[in-house]
Image: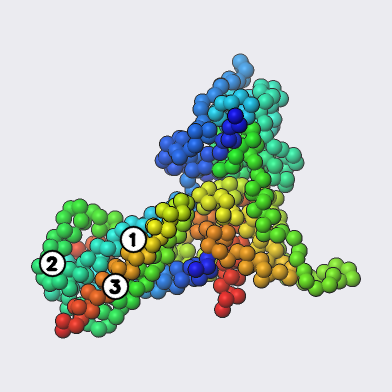
Amino acid sequence: MTGVTHWWRQRVTAAALIPLTLWLVSSLVALGAGGYENFVAWLRSPLVAVLMILFLIALFQHMALGLQVVIEDYVHAVRVKVFAVLAVQFGCLALLVLGVVSVLRIVLRG
Amino acid sequence: MPVRSSDDVPRRTLLRRFPVPRNFNVSPESRIETGKTWPAPVGTTRTRKFAIYRFDPHAGRNPRIDTFEIDLDDCGPMVLDALIKIKNEIDPTLTFRRSCREGVCGSCAMNIDGTNWLACTRFISDTREPATIYPLNNLRIIKDLVPDLSHLFAQYALVKPWLQTKSLPPERERLQLPEERRRLDGYYECILCFCCTAGCPSHWWNPQRFLGPAALLQSWRWLSDSRDEATGERLDELEDPFRLYRCHTILNCTRTCPKHLNPGKAIASIKKLLIERRS
Amino acid sequence: MQRERPLSPNLQIYRPQLTSVLSITHRLTGVLLSVGSPFFVIWIVAAADGARSYAAFADMLGSPLGLALSFMWTFSLFFHLCNGVRHLVWDAGYGFELRTIYTSGWAVLAVSALLTVIAWIAGLRLGA
């Protein structure tokens, strides 16, 4: 990936995360220490589920790109750098899939 | 509290250095030791101590900090005046670059009290007690306050800082509208002192692959020159993840420029141009 | 034997300024958020697994250590969000005058502290 595409994707996911994060934080604050039933009922609604999935996609893409830049800045030994970048990419993908599957499980349980 | 210009010397400091050990992550030959102290002559009232980085390439020892106490009533107002006085009257081996003594040549760029500036335009009254004088950061030191700038100049040459044209040269001058000439203001005035590049943390961690604010400012100077015809090629050179994109808008460069230029803004303009040409 | 020339000090002596301090804090909060994100995913997984897993997770989060870490994580979130907006404004090409850099920097610190406090007070009051 050239520097340009990386830079652009980081900014696009960042812009997407601004409204999504504000939505998530205000929703969680409103839920407060509500408990299991409230949380699941909230997450089950289609709009919330879609926004949550979009949030997870934007979050983990932004995270993977950001951590890659941090590794490139500080790690110079080639083998360590490649291993670290791969670990970050796979980790973020795994977390994303885990998160989306869990949201779908809650929604589809009905 | 907000800083208005790079001239602004802070009066109060919460933190003078980052809280790392003095010789943190420093290779053995670069570890700094304590050196000699030269007190002021008897009878002086207004004095200032200068703690100066010294390195003798022929002595086979590590760099050290020498402290000189100067009689301010017998010295010019600028830090460079103090350095010249020390060299003339106390220790003739003190070595530093200097030329114009008026802030236009860039020779006396050094780290004064933790930030990079020109010694000839920094008032002694704006320094701390003791004033700490180090060479420009993260550079190989030839002697005392003289760093090896060759790889910084090589990075500057890499951006091809000259007019590149494909069309035939005109009969007389290449013409430019006043608005087109104004686009160069704030970029052509760079004196290549390298205060910005030496103060850029990203350049500290990637000095070989990241070009640094000085070279990139000049790259923008040529990108925004209406007479230049190699815009595409110049941008192609900067597309990889390291040459331009190690810049994370830390903005130490804009904060420290002794000529009040804005390398951060220039680099942001290059990034914008790279995106615009893709859309 | 030729010794290598010494390297002049960089981080060891450079003055911390708002520019560099806020920038490294942005990076630090980004990394902290990344480290905390698996726990956010685990939260959703626990909810999908049922009431018992969720209760176990909620207990962990409600412990003194859990609350302290969550508070730090929330501040990191708001700081990274506000400073992120500042970054996007720079990327659009605006706000590079030194005065603006400094004013926006102090504003980011103030707003993120304020948002953290408001979010926690509101969260503790509303849910209870």
Residue A75 is situated, as x and y percent measured from the top left of the image, at: 44, 52
Which residue occupies the extreme top position in the image?
B42
Label 2: chain? C
Q: Is residue B177 above or below residue A77?
A: below
Percent from the top left, x then y, of residue A103?
23, 76
Mark 2, other Cα within 10 Å: few <14 / some 14–19 / many ≥20: some
Q: Which residue is mark 2?
A: C53
Q: Are marks 2 and 3 on the same chain?
A: no
Of the numbered discs 1 and 2, the one sitting upstream in the chain is 1
Name the residue rendered at 27%, 82% in the picture.
A47
- Labelled pair 2, 3 in contact (Cβ < 8 Å): no
The numbered mark at residue B77 is none
Quadrant containing the C terminus of chain B in the rendered view = bottom right
Q: Which numbered disc covers residue A97?
A: 3
Q: Position of residue B50 (x, y in %)?
A: 58, 29
State the residue at coordinates (56%, 50%): B207
Q: What amino acid is found at the position of numbered circle 3 in the picture?
A: Val
Q: Are marks 3 and 1 in contact (CB under 8 Å)?
A: no
Q: Residue at x 77, y 69 (%)?
A: B165
Q: Secondary structure at mark 1?
A: helix
**Would you place residue B105 above or below residue C127 in this image?**
above
- Amino acid beneath label 2: Ser
Whole-number angstrom distance, CA of label 2 to CA of label 3: 19 Å
Q: Residue at x 23, y 79 (%)?
A: A104
Residue to which mark 1 is pinned: C34
Per the model, the C-alpha gap separating discs 1 and 2 is: 23 Å
- In the rendered image, the vertical position of residue B122 relative to residue C83, given as above or below: above
Above or below C88: residue B92: above
Task: Tell which of B213 and B246 is nearer to you.
Answer: B246
Which residue is the extreme one toward the left? Answer: C52
Q: Where in the figure is residue B231, as x and y percent of width and height?
A: 68, 69
Looking at the image, residue C101 sits to the left or right of residue B181; the answer is left
